[in-house]
Amino acid sequence: MASKTARPAYFPALAAERPDIAMCRASAYLARAADAHATRHGLGVGQHLVLKMLDTVGPCSQQVLSEELRIDRSVMVNVCDDLEQSGFVRRERNPEDRRSYAVTLTDEGRKRLAEAENTVSSYLDETFAPLTTSERAQLTALISKLMQL
C-alpha cells in the first residue's frame, strides 16, 4: 500500500507573494461570515449598513448611500425597497433637490438598528478570533489607509 505524502500548501506562499490575492480571499471569507451572521439575525448586511449610515448622517439620497457604502445602485434600490416595506425607512422628497428622494430612518428602523448593533461585537470577536487585539487594530488601520483611494 502506497503511503500518502503530505502535499505542501501552496496558498500561504502565494499570499505572501501576492497580497492582492490574499485580500480577495480574505474578503470573500469575511463576506460569507457577514452574510451568515446577517441571516441568523434577520437583517441583511447592506440593510444594516444603510440603517447605520442614515442614523449617523441623517436623510440622504439612494445615490449618496450607494456611493458612500460602495453598493451598486441597482442593489441599493432593492435594499431600500426592502427596508421601506419593513417600515425601517421612508422615502421623502429631498428638500434640497425636489427631483430626488431622501431616504429617512424611521423610529422602527432605529430600534431595529439598535438590535442589530448589539450582535456586532460578538460577531467581530468570533470572526477575527485568530488575531490579537493589537493585530486587529493594525489590520483596521492598514485597511483604512488602503481604502482612502
Image (cartoon, rainbow, N blue to C red):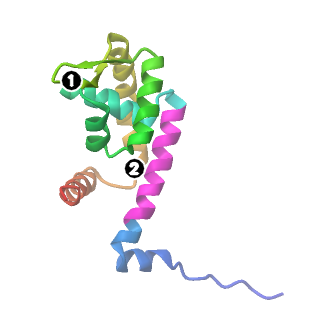
- Which quadrant is home to the C terminus? bottom left
Task: Classify 111 as above or below 3.
Answer: above
Q: Residue at x 55, y 82 (%)?
A: 8
Dot 2 or dot 1, earlier in sequence: 1
Q: Is residue 34 magenta?
A: yes
In x, y percent, where is residue 67? 28, 43
Question: Which residue was labeled with disc 2?
Answer: 129
For badge 1, the amino acid type reads: Gly
> In the rendered structure, does residue 80 fall within the stretch colored magenta?
no
Instruction: Evaluate if marks 2 and 1 touch, with contact meaning CB atoms under 8 Å apart.
Output: no
SS at circle 1: loop
Residue 113 percent across, percent down from the top left: 35, 23
Residue 87 pos. (x, y %) = 42, 14
In this rendering, position of residue 44 left or right of residue 69: right
- For this rendering, which residue is in front, 29 or 68? 68
Q: Nearer the viewer, mark 2 or mark 1?
A: 1
For the record, the magenta segment spans 23-39
According to the picture, the residue beneath numbered tag 1 turns out to be: 58
Residue type for callout 2: Ala
Frontmost residue, 74 versus 137: 74
Q: Is residue 98 left or right of residue 47?
A: left
Label 2, secondary structure: give it: loop
Vertically, is 118 above or below 12? Answer: above
Which residue lies most toward the front here?
Answer: 99
**Which image quadrant is residue 73 in?**
top left
> Which residue does the image show at 33% across and 31% down from the upper left?
50
Residue 74's place in the image compared with 118, above or below, is below
**Dot label at residue 38:** none
Mark 1 Cα-neighbour bin, 10 Å: few <14, some 14–19, many ≥20: few
Q: Main secondary structure of the magenta part?
A: helix
